[in-house]
Structures are given as structure tokens and as C-alpha cells.
Amino acid sequence: MPDNEHTFRCTITMGAGLSREFDEIVGTDEAARTAALRKAILLYVAAKRAANSGAKVGVAEPGQALATEFINI
């Protein structure tokens, strides 16, 4: 493993509804689940950095104003 990488293991407890949605979207393949969680962490980091700089983070249609703003990320 390169010096700039850090590995940790964790257990995530989800409610039945969220777990079911995660399985429907991502599937049950461990590699796909790991990739989805990595992307979620990267999205969280990007959202925190944007919010800390005063930018809004949310969902919008292409070419439209922000329709839904994520708060308290």
C-alpha cells in the first residue's frame, strides 16, 4: 500500500428501510458497496468544503437554480 493511503474498517448499522434502498441501488456485491461508500465519503467531503466556503450544495436540474439545498451536512 502506498504511504499516502490509509485503511480502516468499520461497521455501519442502518435501519431496514435504508438498508433495503442501499441494496436496491448498489446491489449486494461487496466491491460495489465499498465503491458506493467511498463515493459517499468523497461527496460528503466536497459538500462540507463547499458549505464552509459559503457555497450552497444541493440538487438542481441542468441549467436551473438550486431546487433542493442540503443543509446540516
Image (spheres, rainbow, N blue to C red):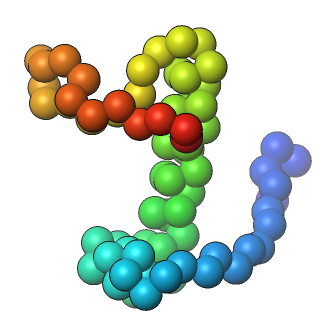
- The reply to whether residue 18 is visible in this rendering is yes
Residue 31 x, y percent position in the rendering: 49, 76
Q: Name the image quarter holding residue 57.
A: top left
State the quadrant of the N terminus: bottom right
**Residue lying farthest to the front in this orientation:** 72
Question: Residue at position x 54%, y 32% from top?
Answer: 46
Residue 35 x, y percent position in the rendering: 49, 64
Observer-nearest residue: 25 or 3? 25
Observer-nearest residue: 23 or 6? 23
**Residue lying farthest to the top in this orientation:** 54
In the depicted structure, whether residue 32 falls above or below residue 46:
below
Count of labels shown?
0
State the quadrant of the C terminus: top right
In the depicted structure, whether residue 38 falls above or below residue 73:
below
Q: Name the image quarter holding residue 24.
A: bottom left
Observer-nearest residue: 42 or 71? 71
- The reply to whether residue 31 is visible in this rendering is no
